[in-house]
Image: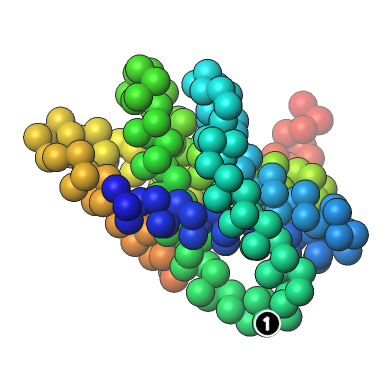
Amino acid sequence: MEALYFFDLAGTFVFAISGTLSGIRKRFDFFGASMIGFVTAVGGGTVRDLLLGFNPVGWMQNVLYLYIILGGIVCAILFKRQVMKLSKALFLFDTVGIGVFTVLGLEKSLLAGVEPVYAIIMGMCSSVVGGVIRDTLCNEIPLIFRKEIYATVCLLGGLLYFLLLGLGVSGPVASVSTILSIIISRLLIIRFQLSFPTLSIDKEEENK
C-alpha cells in the first residue's frame, strides 16, 4: 500500500529526529548524536529482519531510507530549537509511525512464514526496539520500562489484526484498522496519563 510506504518513511524520519535530539540533550558530539538518531530509526526493523533471516535488512534494500534518516539527523542538528517547538507534531508522527511499523512488522513476518504469535512479537519489535537501543546508549532506563504503554498497545494491535483476518476482513482493511487502533489507543493513554503501576519491594521484604 502506498499509504503504508509513505507513513513508513515519515515514521523513519521522525524516529531519526527524536533519536538525534536525545543525543543532543545528552550533549553528545555531532557523530554521537547522529549515531543515536540512526539506530533509533533503523534499530527495530534491523533486529526484526535479522531474526527473520532477511539479508540484507530492509533499509539496506532501498537507499531512500538512508537519505530520509540523514535528512532527519541534519534537521534535528541544524534546527534543534525550532524542532523542539514542534513536539506535538513530532509526537503525532511518532505515534503514526509506531502503528505503521507494527503492521509492517506483522506482514513481513507472515511473508517469512512464522507463526502468528511470533509475527505479533516481531510487529512490536519493529516499533519499540529502536527506542530501547536509543535509551540504552544514552544511559537511560528505556522508556517502555518506565511509564509508556505503547509496547503493550502494539501487542494488542497485533492481536486485533489477526482477529479481523479471522473474521474474514480483507488484509488492507485489517491493516488500516490496526494502525488506527494503535494510534487512537496511544493518544488516549497520553491524554489521560495512563500507565501500569510500578513494581517495588520494601526494605523489610528485601531483607527476608
Judging by the rendered image, the residue that carries numbered circle 1 is 82
**Residue farthest to the left?**
168
Q: Position of residue 1 (x, y in %)?
A: 29, 48
Q: Position of residue 134 (x, y in %)?
A: 71, 48
Residue located at (32% from left, 56% from top): 3
Residue located at (81% from left, 30% from top): 207
- The answer, for residue 140, to whether it is visible in the render is no
* Dot 1 amino acid type: Gln
Q: Is 184 or 11 nearer to us in this picture? A: 11
Q: Residues within 10 Å of mark 1 (few under 14, many from 20)?
A: few
Q: Position of residue 206 (x, y in %)?
A: 77, 33
**Residue farthest to the front?**
63
Quadrant of the image occupied by residue 170: top left
Residue located at (63% from left, 82% from top): 85
Residue located at (43% from left, 36% from top): 105
Q: Position of residue 153 (x, y in %)?
A: 41, 47
